[in-house]
Image (cartoon, helix red, strand yellow):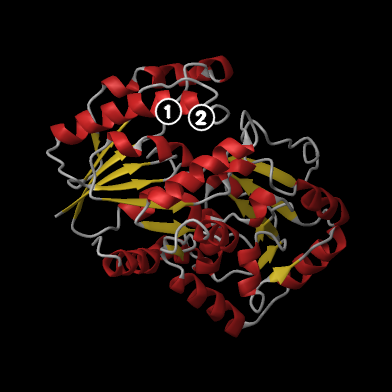
Amino acid sequence: MKQIICLSTTNWHPLPTRKQQVMSRLKDARILYFEPPVTYAAPLKDPAARERLTAHKADGEHITDAITVYAMPPVLPLYNRNRTINKLNQRKLGAFVKRIAEKHGFVDPVLWVYSPAYADIVPYIPHSSLVYDCVDRHSAYQGLIDVQVVDGMEADLAKQAQTVFATAKGLYETLKTYNDKTYLVPNGANFDLFHKAADDKLPFPDALFNVKPPVLGFVGALQECIDYQLVAYAAKQKPEWTFLFLGKALPNADLSILRGIPNVHFLGLIPHKQLPNYMARFDVCLNLFRAGALSQDVSPLKFYEYLATGKPIVSTPQPLQVLDYADSIYIAATEQEFVDCCQRAITEHNKYTTRQRIEYGRAASWDARVLEMERILAENGMW
């Protein structure tokens, strides 16, 4: 049985992202999944983070017989601005991971990482091979980041890896310059779960009893890169439409432009397995990214989940991946185009296009994505 150490950028709970979806589907593997560390300064911004300062002292959580999750020890801040600080952090984290791996009897496992910062942890963890799975343009994030430092760490990490995966074309083109064994594998969807939303007979969520159709819905984190102006314009132009946002608002998201508009509603974070019940009530699914470096190279899970439902999708031209599906979705670059596309989507009655979206969603299932990754790893002698 294969042994994998996964150094993630996402906590295992509450929402499954690419990291959990991939790790839970790898066959014949024992996995130690390490959640990202918080910095010692994190409680200053978020008091709830104080609990994470000592979470690494607890035993690992057994998700399945094959997957055990551990919290990482806290680290010094500013590591994305100062490489020396990052190297100090990674030496500490490396010793922790090595100790846990030895406790579980891991010998030369596959080291599978998601952050450029882990370029400096590689020497401290015995491993047989290294996978870098790149899901974002990390140097485009907001916050205490030095672009050159982050890009430099990513280049070093990619050069060390035996296999590099990238979720978007822009990321692929960058990483390919560092490592010939770089492969484009976009994000995907839990097809079986989200295809349930095609059934309008699913139990009706209480929160939607007073919501009037047509319903135009957005699912996902409410973050800075979402184009809220489009919705504000459309909601005022079409007060008979209902706009729903399902997801947690992140600290950098300014939602003030939507507050007070009577036909715009925020339902907050919905448990993942309950999302199809809500999405079954959508007449239109919305994918709304503003132009920018981060948006251009993102591979949005929500988009593939929307495809699995078969429902009409109205999207901005970002990220670039959506253009591959232009024959079955509506793409709007301006405010008025957004209103016009939504109107066309609401009145769509084309069973062929519905089936086409569903088949696109099936082809983008996590099962299919992970099979492709395993095939590539086998070709590279790692599987």
Work out which residue is located at the far bottom of the displayed protein and give it.
Answer: 352
* Closest to the observer, 231 or 267: 231
355 in relation to 92, above or below:
below
**Disc 2 marks which residue?**
83
Res. 293 visible in picture: yes
- Residue 262, above or below 322: above
Residue 84 percent location from the top left of the image = 48, 25
Residue 340 position within the rendered picture, expressed as x and y whole percent measured from the top left = 82, 68
Report which quarter residue 118 is drawn in.
top left
Compared across the picture, whether 347 is left or right of 40 comes to right
Image quadrant for the N terminus?
bottom left
* Residue at 67% across, 80% down: 349
Mark 1 touches mark 2? (CB < 8 Å): yes
Identify which residue is drawn at 42% across, 60% down: 190
Residue 215 in the image: state x and y as whole percent. Answer: 68, 58
Query: What residue is drawn where x is 66% and y is 72%?
Result: 329
Question: Element at badge 1?
Answer: helix
The residue nearer to you, when weighing 141 against 218, is: 141
Type of the residue with mark 2: Arg
Q: Amino acid at mark 1?
A: Lys
